[in-house]
Each structure stands twice: as C-alpha cells, then as structure tokens.
Image (cartoon, rainbow, N blue to C red):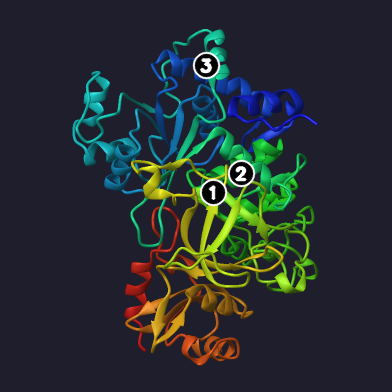
C-alpha cells in the first residue's frame, strides 16, 4: 500500500492521478474536480511566482468559503509559500495585528463580503498602506508586506510550468504549511505554525474515527479560515480524496437544499449548527436519508440518533491541527468510556499532570492535559520553543482531563475557566454538559459571575423548567443562579475566532437578575 502524501504538492498529484474525475469541492452553483483543482492551482501558482511570491512568502488569504479560496490556497501551498488564513470577522485593527504578527508578505483579499470592504477597511486602519505597497515601498504598520491583490486579480504574467514544478519538488515534510490563528476565550490570538508533514499526518490519523472515506460527500459549515473549516473540512476532503460541500454564508433553507441535491453522506461541525438546521421548517420535508451515522445526531432521523453520551466527543484544537482524540463516530463507546473523547490518535502522546508540579498523575486522576508528537504544531509565531513546550517536548494545553486505564480521555474543563463557589470547585464544562442533556436545551454556556454560577441557555422553555431539570443532574452548588434563557442562538457573544467571548458572557449574565 503506497505511503500517504507527506507534502501538499504530493497530495494534489495523488488526487489528480487517483481521483481526478471526482468532484473535490461543491458549492451551491459551482464545482471543481480534483484534477481541475490541480490544474487551476498550478496555473495560479505560475502567476504568483512571476509576481514575486516564492517559498519565503507568507500569504494572507482573506475571503469567504468557496472554490476561489481553495484554488488560491492550493496555489500558495504547492510552491512552498506559507498560507495565513485570515478571518472575515476581524475588525480592521484586529486584521492589521494578525498581518503584522504573521509577517504577511502578500495579501489576497475579497473586495467585499457581508457588507464589508476588506481593503478599504485595511486602508482606514493603516492610512497609506496600499499606496506604499503598490509603489514598491513598505509601511510601518505592516513592514513585511510587499504586495496586495484583490481575489482573482493576481497579474496575468506567468512563469513556465517547469519552474513551478521545480518549486514543488523542493517542498519537504518539515517545511511550514500554514499559520492558523487561534485564541482562548479570553486570551490574545496566537499563530500556530504547522508543517506539511505534521498537518497531513494529523488529518490522516483521524480519518477512520471521523468516518471520512474516499467516497464521502462531507458537509461542514465552518469557514476555511478556522481550523474546523480548513483542517476538518477542506484538507480532510483532499487527504481522503473525497468531496466537500461548502457555502460562503450558510442559511438553513439553502443548506438543506444543497445537502439533499448532493446526497451528502456526512454532516460534521458544531452541534449547535446541526440543531439550528433541524429546527428550520424545511427540515421535516428534506430527504437526508443519505447521511451516515457518523453525522451530528440532530440531523439524523430520531430512530438513528444515539443516546446522549454514547458517542465520543471528538476533541482537538488549532495547535493539533484539529482532532487528536476520538473513536468511531458511527458506533457507541464501551459503557465505561461513555462521556469520553475517545482515545488519542496515532502520533499523539497524552500525559495528565498535576498542574502545579508537572508530575504525571495516576490513571483516572485529573490534571492538565499535555501533548507530544509529530502531529502537533511546530510552534507559535514569535515565541521561542522553550516558551511553548516543556523541556521534554510536551505542549501544556491548559485543558483539564483524565485518562482511564484503557486510554480513554475525559475532558473536564479549562485551567483558566475553573472557579470556586463557596470554596467548592466548579468546572463550566461539567455544568454545560448537564444543561445540554436536558431535552429542551439546544445550547448552554456557563461561567462565573460575581462568585456565582451563571448560564446562558438556548431554549424555548422558561428558566424554571430548565433549572428544575438540571437540579437532578448536578450538586446544588453547581446549579446556576444567574440565568439567561433565550431562543436566539445569536445572543451568544463570540470572538472573531468563533469561540465564546467569556468576558462578554460575564457582562451579559451580570445584568441578569439573581
């Protein structure tokens, strides 16, 4: 059996050879095969090289999901340049900060999306930037920037295909592939650097657990600028040789029509996204019978939905290029492992340590989750290796959990989210899990509010009904005393990275009557 491709150019070549006629990406009105993706990205790569973009470049890509995003990213990666996906949700100062932090040398941006004009906004944040770069100069706000192009407007002049091929042949598994920005719920965004070999290995190690095979038609609503969309969506489909369904702006009625038309076999993403789709009036009439059991439960027929807690909670992070732990999503876990995240994938070593001493704890004991292995990020932008990893190469995640005797990982919370109520420890993730197990609850977000437990709950039910239901699931001191119950999921305050804004959540709950 041939080895898995260890670089992105090798992946494109394999898919062209073995899966050329299969559609790689499908949108509402366009599609592109694996062979066409290879050809289109090679042609764009030749233009990028002619315009001065080579292996030393870091290319920022600011655009919505779609075939143009994928072709552009593939063109960048195949010549050994480093991709820097940028969120379309960023405000201009945030965007400028990420461009400067990642030392972006070339920026390719959609001119307009969701009523925002990215290049105009960038110029307002750094007056004179675009003119300086266009004139061949530099600007203090983004001193590494050498060129800015609108999406689809890279100059037409191209180098010979042989030169592109020569650059591809020089790309190695240890070369940097991408800088992905992430942040905790409170912290400053940080850029995780992943290599070609590490990223592709991380994806390949989890394909079986995530039920992604070559014949899969995968839908994932997350944007490509997040790990969930880039790693678990776009690159997952390419590594598997499968088909990805994607949308620039997911909207329930259109999404249902796309899933039905394309006979989607797998729906992954956040549970809240599936729940919102299932609540739409058009859901009942949609034919989603092609979806496999590895899909999120809310979009499956009631008779095929697993009981709560019986399937693994696939666990990952940007630093691990997506999931690093899981089990088959289409079958129940052993009874003793229910509620777990499954077991670590091949290439990831998990250690549970006492957060204060760093010493490993016994099986079943709770502590900080630390990770080591070739699937992890190479490092963080602007940070020394010793600032990110321990002396023996482990990455302290800041997550809390335990490993049982059979190697199943249980996630219990975050070191920085844990808080005390009258001297007793509360883990928000535990309270959220209890709330989400209540049938009328579609989402739950928990934090501390002035020494009390606060909860924002997505539900149509009154507070009294939710509170009564959760009292039978939690110790009294863990039951929230500050509540916001709403049917609108947009009430949840989010950061530009898509994570919950804990400070915003605390402010919202602080206004709620105790």
Instruction: Write the residue at 32% across / 73% down.
Output: 507
Q: Is residue 151 left or right of residue 139?
A: right
Instruction: Write the residue at 62% across / 26% down.
Output: 37
User: Which residue is nearer to you in this view: 491 or 368?
Assistant: 368
Of mark 1 and mark 2, the one earlier in the sequence is 2
**Could you tell me which secondary element the residue under label 2 belongs to?**
helix
Instruction: Write the residue at 41% across / 68% down.
Output: 356
Residue for badge 1: 320
Q: Are marks 1 and 2 in contact (CB under 8 Å)?
A: yes
Of mark 2 and mark 3, the one earlier in the sequence is 3
Q: Is residue 51 left or right of residue 196?
A: left
Quarter containing the C terminus = bottom left
For residue 131, above or below residue 376: above
**Could you tell me which secondary element the residue under label 3 belongs to?**
helix
Residue for badge 2: 202
Q: Is residue 260 left or right of residue 220?
A: right
Tell me where residue 173 appears, x and y as whole percent. 57, 30
Q: Quadrant of residue 67?
A: top right
User: Which residue is nearer to you in this view: 239 or 416?
Assistant: 416
Residue for badge 3: 167
Instruction: Write the residue at 19% across / 35% down.
Output: 127
């Amino acid at each position: 059996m041939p080895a898995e491709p260890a670089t992105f150019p090798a992946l494109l070549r394999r898919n062209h050879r073995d899966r050329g006629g299969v559609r790689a990406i499908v949108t509402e009105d366009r599609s592109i095969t694996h062979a066409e993706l290879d050809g289109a990205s090679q042609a764009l790569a030749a233009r990028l090289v002619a315009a001065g973009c080579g292996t030393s470049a870091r290319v920022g890509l600011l655009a919505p999901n779609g075939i143009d995003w994928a072709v552009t990213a593939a063109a960048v990666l195949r010549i050994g340049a480093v991709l820097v996906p940028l969120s379309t949700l960023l405000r201009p100062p945030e965007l400028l900060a990420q461009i400067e932090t990642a030392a972006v040398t070339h920026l390719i941006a959609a001119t307009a999306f969701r009523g925002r004009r990215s290049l105009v906004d960038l110029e307002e944040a750094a007056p004179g930037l675009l003119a300086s770069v266009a004139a061949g100069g530099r600007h203090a706000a983004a001193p590494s920037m050498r060129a800015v192009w609108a999406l689809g407007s890279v100059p037409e002049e191209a180098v010979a295909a042989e030169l592109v091929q020569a650059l591809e042949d020089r790309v190695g598994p240890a070369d940097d592939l991408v800088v992905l920005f992430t942040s905790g719920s409170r912290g400053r965004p940080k850029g995780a650097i992943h290599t070609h070999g590490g990223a592709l290995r991380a994806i390949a190690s989890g394909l079986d657990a995530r039920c992604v095979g070559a014949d899969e038609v995968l839908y994932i609503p997350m944007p490509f600028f997040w790990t969930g969309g880039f790693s678990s969506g776009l690159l997952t489909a390419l590594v598997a040789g499968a088909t990805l369904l994607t949308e620039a702006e997911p909207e329930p009625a259109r999404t249902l029509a796309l899933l039905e038309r394309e006979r989607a076999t797998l729906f992954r993403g956040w549970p809240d996204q599936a729940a919102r789709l299932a609540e739409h009036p058009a859901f009942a009439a949609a034919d989603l019978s092609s979806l496999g059991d590895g899909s999120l439960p809310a979009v499956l027929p009631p008779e095929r939905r697993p009981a709560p807690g019986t399937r693994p909670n696939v666990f990952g992070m940007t630093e691990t290029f997506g999931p690093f732990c899981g089990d088959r999503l289409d079958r129940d876990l052993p009874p003793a492992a229910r509620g777990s995240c499954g077991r670590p994938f091949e290439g990831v070593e998990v250690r549970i340590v006492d957060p204060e001493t760093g010493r490993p704890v016994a099986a079943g004991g709770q502590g900080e989750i630390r990770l080591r292995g070739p699937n992890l990020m190479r490092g963080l932008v602007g940070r020394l290796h010793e600032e990110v990893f321990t002396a023996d190469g482990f990455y302290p995640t800041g997550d809390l959990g335990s490993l049982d005797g059979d190697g199943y990982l249980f996630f219990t919370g975050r070191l920085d989210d844990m808080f005390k109520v009258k001297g007793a420890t509360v883990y928000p993730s535990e309270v959220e899990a209890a709330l989400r197990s209540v049938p009328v609850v579609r989402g739950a977000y928990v934090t501390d509010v002035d020494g009390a437990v606060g909860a924002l709950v997505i539900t149509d039910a009154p507070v009294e009904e939710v509170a009564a239901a959760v009292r039978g699931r939690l110790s009294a001191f863990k039951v929230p005393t500050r509540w916001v119950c709403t049917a609108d999921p947009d009430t949840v305050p989010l950061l530009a990275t898509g994570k919950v804004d804990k400070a915003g959540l605390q402010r919202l709950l602080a206004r709620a009557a105790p």
